[in-house]
Image (cartoon, helix red, strand yellow):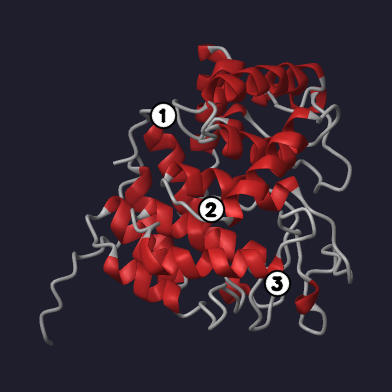
Amino acid sequence: MAETGAPSLPQSPPPHIPVARAERFVWLTARVLEQRLFAHHFRGGAADPVETALDAYRNEDGGYGHALEPDLRGPVSQPLHTAHALHVLDAVGRCAGQRVERICRYLTSVSTADGALPAIHPSQRGYPTAPFVPVVDDPPSALLATGPVVGLLHRNEVWHAWLFRATDFCWQAVESLEESHPYEIEAAVAFLDSAPDRPRAEAAADRLGRLVRAHRLAALDPDDLDAYPVSPGYAPGEHHFPYDYARTPQSLARAWFTDDEMARSLDHLAAQQQEDGGWPVRWRHWAPAPVLESRPLVTVEALRTLRSHGRPVG
C-alpha cells in the first residue's frame, strides 16, 4: 500500500483524551470540510485544504449554498451559509482578499432596505428547508444574521462599503434590546466583541449581561437546569451556558460570569462528550439525510471552546 503520510488513527482512543476520542468520531462521520477543520485545529493541518473543501459550497454570486448549514438544502446562496463560510475562513486565518470582497458584494446584493441581512433570503423558496424555518417574500433585517458577520469582518479589519450601514443597524438593534433570547444575545456579543467603538461596546455589553442574568438566559448551575426556563420556540432542554456567550476568555461576555460559574459550565461541556467521541446537537435541527448532520462541527467547536479557556483536550 502506498505511503500517505497521514498519522495513524488508534483503534481504541484513550478514554481520558477528548481530542483522540473526537478524532475517530470525525473520521467516521464528518463531511470533508469538518475533517479538514479538525486536522487544521488539532493535528497541525494546513489552511489550504480547508479553503479547498469550502470552495465546494461557493456560488458564482460570491455567496455560499449547497447545505453548508444543513437546515437549508439546495444550491442557492443564503446569508446563513455565507456567515458559516466566513466563520470557517476566520478560523483558519483566511478572512481577507478577493474571496471576502466577493462575499461582501453578495451581502450587499441580499441586504434589506436598511442595509442589514435577513435571516433567510426568499431565494430559498422551492428548495427543501427545515419545517421550523420560515421563508417569506419580504424578510426583515435580523441581528441574529447580521451581528456575527459584521463583528467577524471588523475583527479581520475588512473594509467594505457594506459595513457602514450594517454596523449602524447592529448598534441600533443591540442598544434597543429590552427582551431577547440566547441566540440573539450571542449574535450581539459577536458584534460587540469586535465593534470598533470599544467604550460603546463595553457599555452595551454590560447592559446585556445584566439582562441575561435578570431573565435567567444562562444556565448557571448545570445540576439544576429546571431552574432556568427554555426560551419559546427552542427545543426541550435547549439551555445556554456561560461558555455559549463567552466563547473565549477575551469576550466581553466573560465579565458576566464568576470564575466558578464559568468553570462549572466548562465542566458540563466537557462531560457532554458521548461514547462515540462526538458532542451532541442541543438545539432544534433537521436531519432528513444524516450524512449531512452538523454534529461533527459541534464537536470541533466544543473542543476549540474548551481549549480557548485553558482546558486540556489532548
Sequence-first tag of 2 and 1: 2
Would residue 63 be seen by someone viewing this image from the given angle? yes
Sequence-first tag of 3 and 2: 3
The residue positioned 66% from the left and 78% from the top of the image is 289
Which residue bears the numbered disc 2? 298
Q: Residues within 10 Å of mark 2 (few under 14, many from 20)?
A: some
| Quadrant (top left, top right, bottom left, bottom right) of the N terminus | bottom left
- Give the amino acid type for the residue marked by disc 1 in the picture: His
Helix, strand or loop at disc 3? loop
The residue positioned 66% from the left and 80% from the top of the image is 76
- Give the amino acid type for the residue marked by disc 2 in the picture: Val
The nearer-to-camera label among 3 and 2 is: 3
Vertical placement of residue 79 versus 183, above or below: below
Q: In this rendering, would 250 be left or right of 215?
A: left
Vertical placement of residue 279 versus 32, above or below: above
Q: CA distance from mark 2 to mark 1?
A: 17 Å
Q: Residue 183: horizontal and vertical position, in percent?
A: 71, 42
Helix, strand or loop at disc 1? loop
Q: Residue 170: horizontal and vertical position, in percent?
A: 69, 41
Would residue 294 be seen by someone viewing this image from the given angle? no
Q: Residues within 10 Å of mark 3 (few under 14, many from 20)?
A: many
Which residue bears the numbered disc 1? 309
The nearer-to-camera label among 1 and 3 is: 3
Vertical placement of residue 264 versus 165, above or below: above
Which residue bears the numbered disc 3? 72
Helix, strand or loop at disc 2? helix
Instruction: Please state which of residues 194 and 14 is positioned toward the viewer in this rendering.
Output: 194
Q: Residue 266: horizontal and vertical position, in percent?
A: 51, 29
The residue positioned 46% from the left and 52% from the top of the image is 159
The numbered disc on residue 228 is none
- Give the amino acid type for the residue marked by disc 3 in the picture: Leu
